[in-house]
Image (cartoon, rainbow, N blue to C red):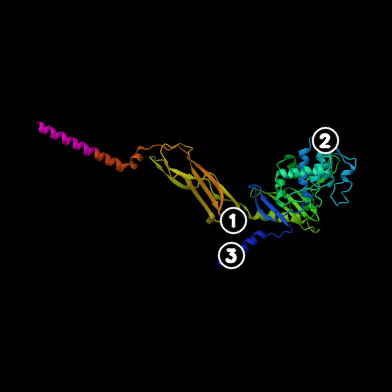
Amino acid sequence: MKKLLCFLICIFISINVYALDLSSKNVVLYNLNDDTVVYEIASDEKVSIASLTKIMTTLVAIEHIDDMDAEVTITYDMIYDLIAKNAAVIGFKTGEKLTYKDLLYATFLPSAADGARGLALTLASSEEEYVGWMNDKAKKMGLTNTHFANVIGLDDKENYGTANEVAIMLKEALKNQIFKEMFETSEYTLTNGMKAKSSMRTSANTYHLNIDYIVGGKTGYTDDAGKCLASVANDSTNDIKYMLINIGASTAKDNAYHILDATEIYNYYFENYKYYDLVNIGYKVTSLDTIYSRDDVDIIVNKDIKYYTNEVNDDLLEITYDGVNEVKAGTKKGTKLGVIHVNYDGKTIDDLDVYLNKDISFSINEFIKAHIRLIILMVITFVCMTLLIVKLNTRRKVKIA
């Protein structure tokens, strides 16, 4: 029976983890509300990351550009070998005048290699120096399994990352307002009249994939990396924001498999996961005794506690109080009494400090009740002593008489 139970548990876990039919080899999905990983496949494996590299390329550029509207001239060195390397380009020409903002949007939206090379060679003395900046930035972010060899994302054994570290990189980049605006843009018109269109949205439209809920994304594709996507989506029904990195999707030309995988993952979590109420504000955990007071002291949960999951089992919820067991009269409002621990399925969900919400007043009646036996004994003793004294005084008077 025990073996059968273990087998069924293993089957359930397997179904829960591998229920999604994906072609992507490396995946990590973050619930950004809590900044927690909720789904992953080989997320720490070092792999080629293709044009997801350009997340770092553009972030480093933004940090080095003083004037977004400054004019840049396209040179032969920026474009001469890109077609031969099978790199995607927007089609800049030697001698063409653009702005840094143009180069950024061209690099990010259609993933143009000529835009990326243009940024590198105008901001640094060489692409190698610029790549050095990118690697320095990666180290500052704590990315120990990420390294860059070029600004484009071309396959190179020294140009790699992990799904999880791409997510960390993207989260950091999105803190920059210029990057965030670019990330969430679908189309941008350059000063030369060219249209820079999001490769993610272009591919989705080609294969009739609905990605209206995806607020922004960056695609990538090389033979080694497969099709890749870094994206952020909003589950508006449940008010949850997600970040997904999926790498190594099929390169077959009958569909945009990186985007198809993203839609399957997002839709599954939109439909099956949300925040459930574990405990509501006002829930009474216990009551404390008071000493010499008529005031009541209830230990109350002071906020709604929610938990992100696909279902809630009340049997897994545990709410406990750890603190003083009684409160003396005279204790002032704001005194810390203890802590409420909210645990679910063996995990700490929240710890709530509990403070007294009123002054505890003294009651003479409660004092008497607490010491009634002693008081009665003292009264009896007093009466007896009084009677004894009276009796003794009476005897003395009789003798004298």
Residue 49 visible within the image: yes
Q: Nearer the viewer, residue 276 or 345?
A: 345
**Residue 322 vertical placement versus 18 (above, below):** above
Q: Gap between marks 1 and 3, in whole Å?
A: 21 Å
Q: Is residue 115 visible?
A: no
Q: Determine whether the residue tagged by mark 1 lies in a helix, strand or loop.
A: loop
Question: Which residue is under mark 2?
Answer: 70
CA gap between label 2 and label 1 equals 54 Å
Q: Position of residue 291 (x, y in %)?
A: 39, 41
Examine the residues drawn in magenta and state their main secondary structure: helix
Q: Which residue is at 53% across, 48% downward?
A: 280
Q: Quadrant of residue 222?
A: bottom right
Residue lying at 28% horizontally and 41% vertically, measured from the top left: 376
The amino acid pointed to by label 2 is: Ala
Image spot of residue 165 (x, y percent):
71, 49
The image shows residue 249, relative to residue 96, as above or below, that is below
Marks 1 and 3, the one that precedes in the sequence: 3
Element marked by disc 3: helix
Residue 336 location (% of width, % of height): 49, 40
| Identity, as a three-letter code, of the amino acid under mark 1 | Glu
Residue position marked by numbered label 1 in the rendering: 311
Q: Nearer the viewer, mark 2 or mark 3?
A: 3
Q: Which label's residue is closer to the chain start, 2 or 3? A: 3
Residue 383 highlighted magenta (yes or no)? yes
Tell me the residue that label 3 is attached to.
6
